[in-house]
Amino acid sequence: MAPSGPRPALPALLVLLAALLPGPGDAQTSVFPRGIILPRGGSVLVNCSSSCDQSPFLGLETPLTKREVLPGGNNWKMFELSNVQEDSQPICFSNCGGRQSTAKTFLTVYWTPERVELAPLPAWQPVGENLTLRCQVEGGAPRSNLTVVLLRGEEELSRQPVVGEPAEVTVTVLAGRDDHGANFSCRTELDLRSQGLGLFENTSAPHQLQTFVLPATPPQLLSPWVLEVDTQGTVVCSLDGLFPVSEAQVHLALGDQKLNHTVTYGIDSLSAKASVKGTAEEEGTQPLLCAVILGNQSRETRKTVTVYSFPAPKVILTEPEVSEGTEVIVKCEAHPRATVMLNGAPAQTPGPSAQLRLKARPEDDGRNFSCSATLEVAGQVVHKNQTRELRVLYGPQLDEKDCPRNWTWPENSQQTVTCQAWGNPLPQLECLKDGILSLPIGKSVNVTRDLAGTYLCRATSTRGEVTCQVTVNVVNAPSPTYEVAIIALVVTAAILGAAGFAVYLYNRQRKIRKYRLQQAQNGTPMKPITQATPP
């Protein structure tokens, strides 16, 4: 009899019961149906009958809610059992002439689990480590027909029976990179197809897994060992072999100062770059931290950075501008722990200061005094330099080497007047003839007779003036005909010399041949004659 749906028609039921009743010689109790499977909370009709030929006493013993339906007959009764919640074995009984007999029917209740839940997965699962999936099941019957399937997406990982209440079904798998982002779930299957029913499935909510790889090696941290106050350095932190690299995070800090950084990602690597600035408050040894965080793990590298203060040395002149002959003191002062070197200063005991004394000379004008200071910080030597320029006031001067006193130039030639006055401040120079005609100093001029004469050159500055006389002599230019004659004479002499040398060689060879002929006629062995190099 089906567990639900409309009840069967009474005439058909009576015909079926008549066919199942025992014969007249038997006084037995029968039940129909003998076994049935129905959904929890469902109802079922149970028929109790007896083969007694008298009017037996019939009944149904059960803790279930029951009621007698239909008028019944002399030897059968129909009962309706409702709200069946669990498996039960109702007993039909009859009393025939003081003789009692019984018969059982088996009611099997089916229902799908009330709870099918996959236990939460770890937030992050290391690749290459075992992952245990746990499916928790509450309720569901009959358990003999109930199984649990653990799934990766639609892939079946394990199929197991449901045992216990509540039941927990587990399977252990090896987590891999392919599992990153995969959905895991579990499903119960109540298979009643052999009972003429269907396959009833309940599936848990899926859980997404995140897997990761974080190598055991610490990050590589590159940074300056020392950092000067108010200067910037660059810190680079990198690590290879990460998966998924896009999920990795980097933490960079100098002391209590978190460093803002930019991260560049590779296929399985990252590199974080940050600028770090030393402050006066951080002066001293500060810890530098680089941490790469992925999943629920991290890798760290620590080192120390020494923040130091090292101002440039001071170069002090008694006066930055002095007159020629004035004594000048040059001092160099630096950090108390520094060692300084002042160029031009005599050898002194190394220390944070040095000094030089000198008398200002014209050649000292524009001279740079450089002080170099060195300081050892955390095993490294750092350098600072400072330079000051000395200005020496001198002159004006008109030295003969810079302004010749006499020039002799051919007429109509191109010449440049060179006359240089020296001094600081730079003097103004002017050369005049008869107080009127100016000599074009530093310019190319065509020499004419008018240029000849004596000039008074005057160099003037705020420090005074000096003068000297220069003379320009203009001589006649060589005649073109004279030059041609000289060239012809030289060419003629060369030709005659070449001809004379040729005649000399010819006569010498002729004499040698004549000598050899005479020796041959006299039968005298000839000695080799070495030809002398002509003079």
Image (cartoon, grey):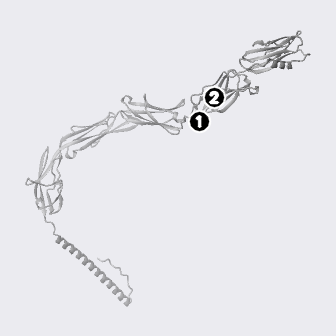
Q: How many marks?
A: 2
Residue 212, horizontal then vertical, whole percent: 56, 33
Between 522 and 340, the one lying in front of the other is 340
Is residue 115 shown left or right of residue 30? Answer: left
Between 113 and 410, the one lying in front of the other is 113
> Residue 345 lies in what quarter of the image?
top left
Residue projecting furthest to the bottom: 521
Q: Nearer the viewer, mark 2 or mark 1?
A: 2
What element does badge 1 sit on? helix
What element does badge 2 sit on? strand
Residue projecting furthest to the left: 434
Residue 284, horizontal then vertical, whole percent: 39, 30
Is residue 11 shown left or right of residue 524? Answer: right
Task: Give the amino acid at mark 1.
Answer: Arg
Could one spot residue 371 in this view of the protein?
A: yes
State whether residue 10 is above or below residue 191.
Answer: above
Residue projecting furthest to the top: 98
Q: Which mark is residue 177?
A: 1
Could one spot residue 345 in this view of the protein?
A: no
Residue 401, horizontal then vertical, whole percent: 18, 54
- The quadrant in which the N terminus is found is top right
State whether residue 251 is above or below residue 165.
Answer: below
Is residue 213 shown left or right of residue 347? Answer: right
> Residue 387 lies in what quarter of the image?
top left
Q: Earlier in the sequence, mark 2 or mark 1?
A: 1
State whether residue 361 is above or below residue 180.
Answer: below
Q: Which mark is residue 185?
A: 2
Is residue 338 shown left or right of residue 60? Answer: left
Task: Give the amino acid at mark 2.
Answer: Ser
Between 480 and 11, the one lying in front of the other is 11
Residue that appears at 36% across and 86% down: 516
Residue 405, horizontal then vertical, whole percent: 14, 56
